[in-house]
Image: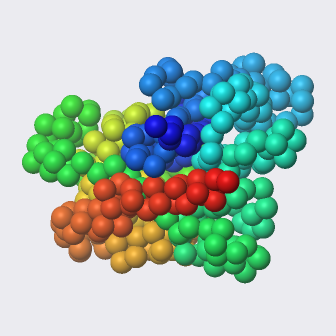
Amino acid sequence: MKNKPVVFIVCTGVGHIRRGYESFTEECFAALKDAQGFKMYLLKGGGKSEKQAFRIPCVQRNTGLSKKIATWMRTEAYFVEQFSFLLAMMPLVIWYRPSVIYYSDFKLGTWLWQLRRFFKFRYKLLFANGAPNGPPFTRMDHVQQLLPLYIEQACAGGTAMEKQTLLPYAININEEAIAAMFRNKVEWRKRLGLPAAMKVMISVGAVNSHHKRMDYVIREFALLPASDFFLVLLGQTDADSQGIINLANELLPQHNFIIQQVSSEQVRQYMCVADYFILASLSEGLPRVLPEALSTGLFPIVHDYAVTRQTLGSYGVYRDLQQNGQLVHAIAVVDHMGIKRAEFLNYAIKTYSWDTLLPQYEKMIVQLISNNEV
């Protein structure tokens, strides 16, 4: 019996970094590892090696060693992680001879393209354009575009429609678990260390000021009555996060907020028992946290631009989050909407769940494999 074609899904941050890239890669591997048309392997930069999942030894970006090497090379620690990962994954490429390598890190994909040319490898490169990057897309064979606007931009930049697939990030939605948390909201708040009687505002993303703009969230939250509202900031923390923590300590009462890094499953738990959700970033690819918020029944407060409009449709509160004083008015809109958790959940399932989108992911990969066969 002929062996199935091999597909590598690779992400250097899986196992030690918590971002959308990493959570998507892990969920995609779990959903597709037993696909009928191919056999998928996960190549990751952290955690433990398991069945069909290999930890690739690399110099992780947040270590002292990577920063020293980056300083010596006059580059970034992220570059060091990517390059060391590339070198260490080569034996697996030679041994398994993958038909497709599916990736999100643009730099890693560019190097894989160059290595393919030099060593005459036969793998096809499938790029999940989550940053997003713009055209021309000349260092990959196919591009997964997450929203219609990126298809339009790519076509305008000369990329053929045949080289692209419009397919948003899929997310795991456990309806039974979500319903159970709704029913036991007080108990779950107690488990998570949240006040039972206060309104809880949550924001999820890297705890920084330059992209996720957590400083803006804190300043806006500080305008709300301290006796009524509690703030939860969840996301990847690093050296840049201390400034956000200091700002929260300065502007907010000590017992009115938490800032921490938790697992993806815990993020969903916090969302299920929250009352409001805000994402203050001004530019994104397709932030997975928005459909995740909808799936837990939250009505996201977001900056008003094309990405959020195409991601949420009519299921968002759109404001100019470059201006001050927006959160107070946005909360009033959410309150006026009332509780429509079931409606939000149904939209998220139809639009973003793995149950809905899995066949499209399989089709995209199988077609690329077919193009690679002699």
352 displayed left or right of 125: left
Q: How is the image coloured?
A: rainbow
Q: Residue at x 13, y 37 (%)?
A: 187
Quarter-of-image position of residue 148: bottom right
Image quadrant for the C terminus? bottom right
363 displayed left or right of 112: left
Q: Residue furthest front?
A: 1
Vertical relation: 206 (above or below) 46: below
199 displayed left or right of 288: left
Front residue of this view, candidates 151 and 248 = 151
109 displayed left or right of 346: right
Residue 248: x %, y % from top left: 48, 41
Vertical relation: 14 (above or below) 290: above
Q: Residue at x 32, y 45 (%)?
A: 268
Residue 331: x %, y % from top left: 33, 66
Asked if one can make out residue 85 in the rendered structure from this viewpoint, the answer is no
Vertical relation: 120 (above or below) 345: above
Q: How many marks?
A: 0
Q: Residue at x 60, y 28 (%)?
A: 45
Asked if one can make out residue 163 in the rendered structure from this viewpoint, the answer is yes
Residue 259: x %, y % from top left: 44, 37
Q: Residue furthest left?
A: 183
Q: Residue at x 70, y 75 (%)?
A: 160
Front residue of this view, candidates 62 and 123 = 123
Vertical relation: 68 (above or below) 185: above
Residue 33: x %, y % from top left: 43, 40
